[in-house]
Image (cartoon, grey):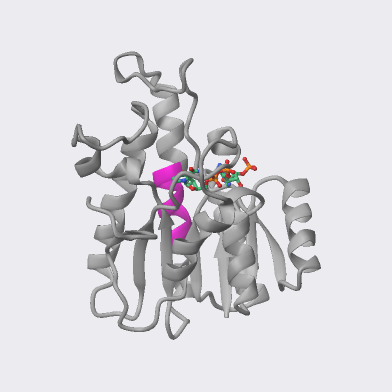
C-alpha cells in the first residue's frame, strides 16, 4: 500500500506519515524543503517506516507534476493521498485576521496553499489513485471552517481568522464536490479536523499532540470499502458544515 502525505516534514503531517507507515504503508513524505524532507525521511526510517522523499510545493504546478511522476516511477499507483499541507497566513498582532483590514495578498497566499494546492495535488495524483482497488483522499481541514460553529455564539471557536477559516470552509465545499464527482466509484474522500494541536502552526499552543491530531486523518485514509465519503470528521464524529 502506498500513501502520499503533503507537508509531512513536521507537525500533524509527520505523524500521519508515521502512523500510516506503522500500518504497513510505504509513505511518500511530501515536503518542499530538501533538508527538512530528508531529516523527516531519516527519522521515519529509523522507526521502521518505509518512507521516501517527495519534493513537493503544493503551490507550484511543476513541482506537483514532478511529484506525480516520481510516485509513478517508484510505485506505479497510490492508495491514499492526505492533503495535509496548510498555512494560517500572516496574522495581525494578537493572532487575529481582521476581515476589515485584510491584506489581499495574505488571502491569495492562503487560498493558493490551502485550497488550490489541494486541487493541484489531488488532480495530479488522480491517475495514480484510480489504479488502486480502494483509493482514499483525506483533506486536512479545521473545525474553524465550520460555518455552523462559526455562527453559534455559544461555541468557543477561537479568534477571527478572515483568511484561514474561510479557506477551510472552501476546502470543505470542494470535498463535497469531489465526492459527488466520485459517486459510483471506489474513491472515498473526506475532510478531517485534527483538533487544536501543539505544532509550529499554533506556536506550540494547544491541548493535543500531533499524534492525537493525526488519528482522524489516518482513520479516514484507511477506511474500508463502503465507508463514508463527502463528510467532515473529528475524533468525536461528524463536524457540521
Ligand atoms: N495545529 C492545529 O491546531 C490545526 C488545527 C486544525 C487544522 N490544522 C491543519 O492541519 C494541517 C497541518 O498543520 P500543522 O499544525 O501540522 O502545521 P505545521 O506544523 O506548520 O505544518 C505544516 C506543514 O505544511 C507544509 N507546507 C506549508 N506550505 C506548503 C507548501 N506550499 N507546499 C508544501 N508544504 C507546505 C509545511 O512545510 P514547511 O516546513 O516547509 O513550512 C509543514 O510541513 C494544516 O492543513 C492545518 O491547517 C491544524
Q: Is residue 44 left or right of residue 236?
A: right
Q: Ligand 1 shows up in which quadrant of the image?
A: top right
Residue 123 in sight in this render: no
Which of the pair 93/120 is nearer the observer?
93
Give x and y (percent) for residue 230. 27, 64
Residue 104 in sight in this render: yes
Q: Is residue 67 left or right of residue 134?
A: right
Query: Magenta stretch: residue 33 in it?
Result: no
- Occupied quadrant, residue 153: top left
Q: Is residue 148 left or right of residue 74?
A: left
Kindly identify the residue that appears in the image at 46 percent across and 17 percent down: 92
Query: How many numbered markers are drawn?
Result: 0
Query: Magenta stretch: residue 118 in it?
Result: yes
Kindly identify the residue that appears in the image at 52 percent across and 59 percent down: 214
Give x and y (percent) for residue 163. 37, 30
- Whether 225 is drawn above or below 100: the answer is below
Give x and y (percent) for residue 229. 29, 69
Residue segment shown in magenta: 114-124
- Occupied quadrant, residue 5: bottom right
Give x and y (percent) for residue 177. 25, 59
Quarter of the figure with the N terminus:
bottom right
Which of the pair 88/149 is nearer the observer?
149
Kindly identify the residue that appears in the image at 44 percent across and 25 percent down: 106
Which of the pair 230/233 is nearer the observer?
233
Kindly identify the residue that appears in the image at 34 percent across and 49 percent down: 171
- Whether 210 is drawn above or below 101: the answer is below
Principal secondary structure, stretch drawn in magenta = helix
Amino acid at each position: 500500500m502506498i500513501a502520499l502525505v503533503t507537508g509531512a516534514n513536521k507537525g500533524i503531517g509527520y505523524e500521519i506519515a508515521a502512523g500510516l507507515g506503522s500500518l504497513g504503508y510505504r509513505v511518500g513524505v511530501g515536503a518542499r524543503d530538501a533538508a527538512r524532507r530528508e531529516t523527516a525521511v531519516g527519522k521515519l526510517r529509523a522507526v521502521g517506516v518505509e518512507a521516501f522523499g517527495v519534493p513537493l510545493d503544493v503551490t507550484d504546478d511543476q513541482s506537483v507534476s514532478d511529484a506525480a511522476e516520481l510516485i509513478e516511477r517508484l510505485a506505479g499507483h497510490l492508495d491514499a493521498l492526505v492533503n495535509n499541507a496548510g498555512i494560517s497566513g500572516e496574522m495581525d498582532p494578537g493572532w487575529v485576521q481582521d476581515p476589515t483590514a485584510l491584506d489581499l495578498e495574505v488571502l491569495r497566499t492562503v487560498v493558493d496553499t490551502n485550497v488550490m494546492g489541494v486541487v493541484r495535488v489531488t488532480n495530479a495524483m488522480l491517475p495514480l489513485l484510480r489504479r488502486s482497488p480502494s483509493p482514499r483522499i483525506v483533506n486536512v481541514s479545521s473545525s474553524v471552517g465550520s460555518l455552523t460553529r462559526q455562527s453559534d455564539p455559544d461555541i468557543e471557536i477561537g479568534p477571527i481568522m478572515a483568511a484561514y477559516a474561510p479557506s477551510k470552509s472552501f476546502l470543505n465545499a470542494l470535498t463535497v464536490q469531489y465526492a459527488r464527482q466520485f459517486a459510483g466509484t471506489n474513491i472515498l474522500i473526506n475532510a478531517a479536523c485534527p483538533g487544536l494541536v501543539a505544532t509550529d502552526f499554533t506556536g506550540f499552543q494547544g491541548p493535543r499532540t500531533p499524534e492525537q491530531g493525526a488519528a482522524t486523518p489516518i482513520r479516514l485514509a484507511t477506511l474500508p470499502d463502503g465507508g463514508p465519503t463527502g463528510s467532515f470528521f473529528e475524533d468525536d464524529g461528524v463536524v457540521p458544515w
